[in-house]
Image: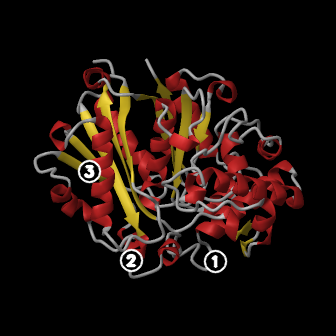
Amino acid sequence: MSATRVGVIGVGMTPMRTRRPDTDLFGLIRDAAVAALDDAAVSMADVDLVVLSQAPDALHGFGHPEQEIVDVLAARGKRLVRVHTGGATGTSAAQMAWWAIAAGESQCALVVGADKMGDSLQPAQQALNLIWDPAYESLLPLNTISMTALQAQRYLRHHGIGLRRAEEVWAQVASRLRHNGALNPAAHLRKPVTPEEVLASPLLFAPIRRDMACPQTSGGVALVMTSAERAAVMARPTAWIDGFAARTNTYFLGDKMGAVSDNDHGLFPELALAAAAAYAQAGITDPGREIDVAEPYIPFATMEPIAVEALGLSAPGRGIADAEQGRFDRDGRIPVNPSGGVLCANPISVSALARVAEGARQVRGRAGDHQVEGCRTAVVSGAGGSIQFVGVAVLRGGD
């Protein structure tokens, strides 16, 4: 049996904030789900599969939230599965629904999740400090910030790019994304900053400064995904997912730090592999020309040049120069994160799902004030663990 085409017909997203004392984790999940179902003009009676996009319990303070979700979403008697791959959880969850629908095992799936890190008894960063191997890497001061800082340092070393020039470009990237976030009512950080303000902000771990980093966010995201047959009956604006691929890398950072290696920590090789596979499925042969909008997973401004190169939107070593020349601006050749991206909102369980949601909004022409005119094809990505898990999807509008 041939695979069916899979589309997104509903998107729901709560406002992203530091804390939401007015509701709990399940309230955020319910609100995002209701918004997506309303957008798709369906009800839970139409849904035959629920995929819960939920990262570690320590980040939101609830043990096994999938148990309560059955009742919260009126999902008794339906199939439900929880997915967790760190920051890539959202793309992994969407891909699971994509697989099920393409295989004919589901006709209408709800992919939903939320994070509410203010509910946890321990700070989110404390939980993230514990994700490395206790025997081999616990003695190093590793956390998500230092891990990403090392990635940036190795990227500069590999391409022979000077730190001063890179810092100025990273500041421009952070400023651009914050200005994009100001146009997005769902974004957490909506106050624009200048490159000068970015460079004047405190240093967290060289070369990352505070205003180059994402916030700690509470919020929920949901998608309604259907088969082509069901989408035709629904007659809703559809974002077709024509390519979806995931790849993994080693858990150990030391294995990506060799003097000569095709798996260098600074080059995002697993993202390049996933992108190549997703493009092949979607029939994309020249992403630099065929992609209209990109929503990659960029929680730190230093990651943008590395990510756009791995996604084939810049030639190797050209990410810094292309950013300097405005290639990724809202009015540039390929706007990158016109929503503000993860840099402006990071509810970890659904940060990557928000990328799929934003890509779907763009190709459906429903992104509001941050809509990119004429967007027909978008690429989105998620990344999680010790930059270990990645997912890439290609979305198209119309047809």
Q: Label 2 neighbourhood size at 10 Å, few (<14), some (14-19), many (20+)?
A: some
Residue 398 percent coordinates (x, y): 45, 21
Q: Name the residue carrying label 3.
A: 81
Colour scheme in the image? secondary structure
Going by the numbered disc 3, the residue's amino acid type is Val
Do the CB atoms of the residues marked 2 and 1 lie less than 8 Å apart? Answer: no
- Whether residue 198 is situated above or below residue 293 in the rendered picture: below
Upstream in sequence: badge 2 or badge 1 = 2
Q: Name the residue carrying label 2.
A: 120
Q: Name the residue carrying label 1.
A: 141
- Whether residue 375 is situated above or below residue 140 in the rendered picture: above
In the image, what residue occupies the spot 26% across and 64% down? 65
Q: CA distance from mark 2 to mark 1?
A: 23 Å
Q: Quadrant of residue 164?
A: bottom right
Residue 224 percent coordinates (x, y): 32, 39
Do the CB atoms of the residues marked 3 and 1 lie less than 8 Å apart? Answer: no
Going by the numbered disc 2, the residue's amino acid type is Ser
Q: Nearer the viewer, residue 344 or 53?
A: 344
Can residue 241 be seen at all in this image of the molecule?
yes
Residue 232 percent coordinates (x, y): 29, 20
Can residue 392 be seen at all in this image of the molecule?
no
In the image, what residue occupies the spot 42% across and 53% down? 89
Left or right, residue 206 beside residue 348: right
Q: Quadrant of residue 194?
A: bottom right
Q: Label 1 neighbourhood size at 10 Å, few (<14), some (14-19), many (20+)?
A: few
Which secondary structure lies at badge 2? loop
Disc tally is 3
Which secondary structure lies at badge 1? loop
Do the CB atoms of the residues marked 3 and 2 lie less than 8 Å apart? Answer: no
Left or right, residue 140 beside residue 36: right
